[in-house]
Amino acid sequence: MSQPQWITVLGATGSIGLSTLDVIARHPERYQVFAMSGYSRLTELRALCLKHTPRYCVVPNPIAADELQRSLQAAGCATEVLVGEEGLCQVAAAPEVDAVMAAIVGAAGLRPTLAAVHAGKKILLANKEALVMSGALFMQAVQRSGSVLLPIDSEHNAIFQCLPQDFARGLTAVGVRRILLTASGGPFRQTPLAELEQVTPAQACAHPNWSMGRKISVDSATMMNKGLELIEACWLFDARPEQVEVVVHPQSVIHSLVDYVDGSVLAQLGNPDMRTPIAHALAWPQRLDSGVAPLDLFSIARLDFQAPDEQRFPCLRLAREAAQAGGSAPAMLNAANEVAVEAFLQGRLRYPEIARMIAAVLEREAVVPVDDLDAVFAADGRARMLAEQWLSRRGQ
């Protein structure tokens, strides 16, 4: 490779963004950071700019931008600071950019990721909400633009690696019977149900295997994360919801499996470290060193599996129902969950009420078709309003 590829990292201060920057830094001859973004951790973003010297960085508001720009200039750093969603879309679609790591959490990542898609970039998709909210529209945009879409979630990356290259012809056509989507079960897999009422945010964020941000850690605890991944898998691999089966695998060593009609089951294994799927997607179709230690099967010694308990994890059932309903249901599911998780982290909602609130929102609103992005955001906004109303009534 004569010239390094230019990479934009959206969500640079989160766990995925930091892991991406770590892999990039290991291969400076292959990759350079074109731009990065941050939301609230601006001190960390400044340090990353000084280390990686991107051309641009993006922050959420003008006040933060002015402060960061002055600080960077004082340190002799030439990085230009941009603002808001417009800035995010600019650095995602810039002509110089070869690949975009889409790692902004939640609905906020949809428009910048779509900007990268429309520009025909190689998309490293860690923002599952983009596909959950606008699956058909998103995949149509990928097909029209010729963009290369590579999944970063460890489970979807594992499935991608286990499928044949021509899987786009359809799962049945390539002999796939089902996709087995693994889940760790999170920190409350064996907690007595009665004790879940007293779960604290700190406990919900203490994932046994993965180091993740607070929102995704709570989603993992409720298994909403797995529900969102189920919806994402349907769009990525053109699968029906009934073709995707969730399997609880506490060790998080098998990242997912593909079951073929001849009885073969292919699995991708590795240590629970996000640098593996990131390095795979960055270098695809080649391979490169990610910095992840080799898997030691002798120290692991055993691999366990069990079916998910939907009484313990009602969010998984809600997500599957939304996937089957289609239309506006997944966008509303995601929006209600974002409001619920934030309320839980703020101490305004008890842990079991996360699922109850999401269910209440979905019951209040009929599912409608989503034919354009405006319809997607209308469903998102309606669900957020209903969720806030539910919270307000609960507080009375």
Image (cartoon, rainbow, N blue to C red):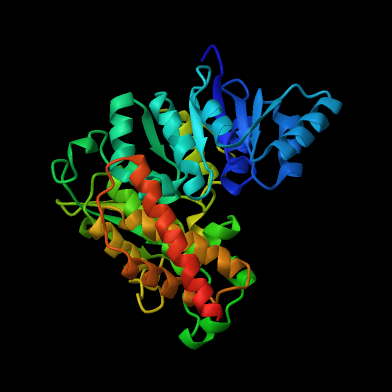
The residue drawn where x is 29% and y is 45% is: 235
Q: Nearer the viewer, residue 379 or 182?
A: 379
The residue drawn where x is 54% and y is 11% is: 2
The residue drawn where x is 57% and y is 67% is: 343
Asked which quadrant contains residue 35, the reply is top right
Q: Nearer the viewer, residue 93 or 9?
A: 93
Where does residue 331 sit, x and y in percent of width and height? 37, 54
Which quadrant is the C terminus positioned in?
Answer: bottom right
Where does residue 134 sit, x and y in percent of width and height? 34, 45
Asked which quadrant contains residue 230, the reply is bottom left
Q: Nearer the viewer, residue 57 or 301?
A: 57
Name the residue at the right extreme: 74
Is 193 located above or below residue 345 in the figure? below
On the rendered structure, is 168 left or right of 193? left
Is 248 located above or below residue 121 in the figure? below
Residue 209 seen from this side: no
Is 40 located above or below residue 82 in the figure? below
Where does residue 386 sit, x and y in percent of width and height? 43, 65
Is 58 located above or below residue 265 in the figure? above
Q: Nearer the viewer, residue 176 or 266?
A: 176
Name the residue at the top extreme: 2
The residue drawn where x is 68% and y is 48% is: 40
Residue 32 seen from this side: yes
In this figure, what is the number of numbered marks?
0
Where does residue 293 sit, x and y in percent of width and height? 57, 46
